[in-house]
Image (cartoon, rainbow, N blue to C red):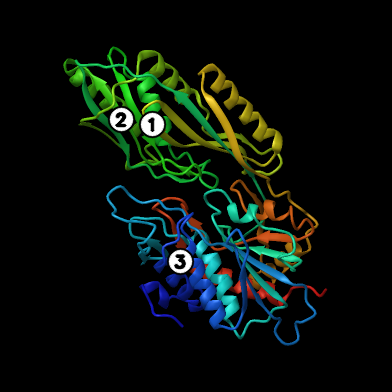
Amino acid sequence: MFKPHSEISQLEPKAIWQFFDQICAIAHPSKHEEALAQFIVDWATSQNLSVHRDTTGNVFIKKPATTGMEDRKAVVLQAHIDMVPQKNDDTVHDFTCDPIKPYIDGEWVTATGTTLGADNGIGMASCLAVLAADDISHGPLEVLLTIDEEAGMTGAFGLEEGWLEGEILLNTDSEQEGEIYMGCAGGIDASLKVAIEREAQTNLSTYELVLKGLKGGHSGVDIHTGRANANKLLARFLQNHISGIDLRLVSIKGGSLRNAIPREAFAQVAIPASQLEEFQQHLKAFEIILKSELSSIETGLTLTLNEVNTELSPMNVASQSRLLALLNACPNGVVRMSDDIKGVVETSLNMGVITTDSDKVEVLCLVRSLIDSGREDVVGTLRSLATLADADIEFSGAYPGWKPDPDSEILHIFRDVYEEIYGKKPDIMVIHAGLECGLFKKPYPHMDMISFGPTIKFPHSPDEKVKIDTVGLYWQQMKAILANIPRK
């Protein structure tokens, strides 16, 4: 079908892996999906499929029903085009132009030093594979590929009434084979801005404190796993573990995405040269504490100190005190587990990104919750913290959760088909991560939806990997469910 770019193109089922191989070869991080979107449009056109785009940039492709299936309900297969760009510090990679380098690692496919993009590239590949196939029975079919899901769900927010005719939507953005998702969390972004003042200091030496080697991960899927947040650990050290040190903070930064658990954080600090050895002792003691606390999870954690030059003056004592108190007190991680759905996080917060300018520090957080009241509770907490720290706070990008529908027809059909194939029922779940389904319900309130997919571990981190055999199981399920779509 295509020129192979990597060894994964030879995996089975080739129908999916050959498309995913092509997807990996074309740069497509959030906000930079145009090259891949255009590739898909050109391919669909070459296949004589009906393809068009809306003003937001979403891609729509239609395929007629196969012979004998014309009376079935129309189905929308849905995936998002973009991927999360995360890399290891020692990996040289420009996500806006460099291809992902996938490789086979035993039972898994992963990437060299970067996120793989199986989230949601495997789902997207499966949608295209259905379009390309001439041996799959299906009714009237539409494929919806949205843009910018990972960085703000721009495509889903921009989806308008009238573009889709399907009555059933199969979302392919789930990450555990054997589970069918019927609901997800909603969320909202929070930006806290702390104004800072600086003052000249001539008797201090400047160093950069570097915390690296954490696993990171998806702030919805992995938030309950105990993975450490680099921003929180660094704030904890600067606030609570430098007794007796005349430290002045110059800058602090960490994380790169509000929906990824930060793996690295950096702080430039100014201290008297006479206190350097004592400061290093504090740092070593804190590293020992962290490695003891996190020994079963964060095996690669490192704390280092390097002398640096900077043009910025240190923050004054009042600014530093307010900032560190805010960072240290800000909630992070699981806020509450669900009472209704065993083992599922109800509400969480991720302190995803910290950046420092000459006159302010900005903190970006993502709040997720299955229930509106849980989200509003955390919003209220953040407002209170902002008041106490004399910080400005703004909320944006709120998106709704996807309310479970236990009477969903397609849910019950999928469950029965799964049991017929494998002799066991799948787990019916609600996921704490955000899926686009909740936003689709606004323009298409009566659309029946489920989400499913292969097993993908550690999305939003360079450890991301997809289990090879589950891609085959997922493909088997996709074909079976399309063959069993009910009549109109």
Q: Is residue 418 left or right of residue 288?
A: right
Percent position (x, y) of residue 270?
Answer: 25, 21
Q: Label 2: state its secondary structure.
A: helix
> In which quarter of the view is residue 479 placed?
bottom right
Q: Work out which residue is located at the far left of the displayed protein and give it.
A: 274
Q: Real-space Cα distance between discs 2 and 3?
A: 44 Å
Dot 3: within a 10 Å radius of its alpha carbon, few (fewer than 14), some, or many (20 or more) residues?
some
Can residue 249 be seen in this snapshot? Answer: yes
Q: Amino acid at mark 3?
A: Ala
Whichever of callouts 2 and 1 sits on the residue coming sooner in the sequence is 2
Q: Which residue is the extreme one toward the right? A: 488
- Residue 411: image quadrant is bottom right
Q: CA distance from mark 1 to mark 3?
A: 32 Å
- Tell me which numbered mark, 2 or 3, is placed earlier along the sequence: 3
Q: Which disc number belongs to residue 287?
A: 2
Residue 236 rendering spot, x and y as whole percentages: 40, 25
**Could you classify mark 2 by the number of other residues whose Cα lies within 10 Å: few (under 14), some (14-19), or many (20 or more)?**
some
Image vertical order of residue 84 relative to residue 140, above or below = above
Q: Residue at x 71, y 41 (%)?
A: 340
The reply to whether dot 2 and dot 1 touch (C-beta < 8 Å) is no
Q: Residue at coordinates 32% horizontally, 22% vertically from top-left?
A: 249
The residue at which mark 1 appears reads as 356
Which is nearer the eye, 442 or 212? 442
Total residue callouts: 3
- Seen from this angle, which residue lies furthest bottom? 67
Res 470 seen here = no
Give residue 406's mark. none
- Category of crowding for the residue at label 1, using alpha-carbon neighbours closer than 10 angstroms: few (below 14), some (14–19), many (at least 20): some
Read off the residue under disc 3: 35
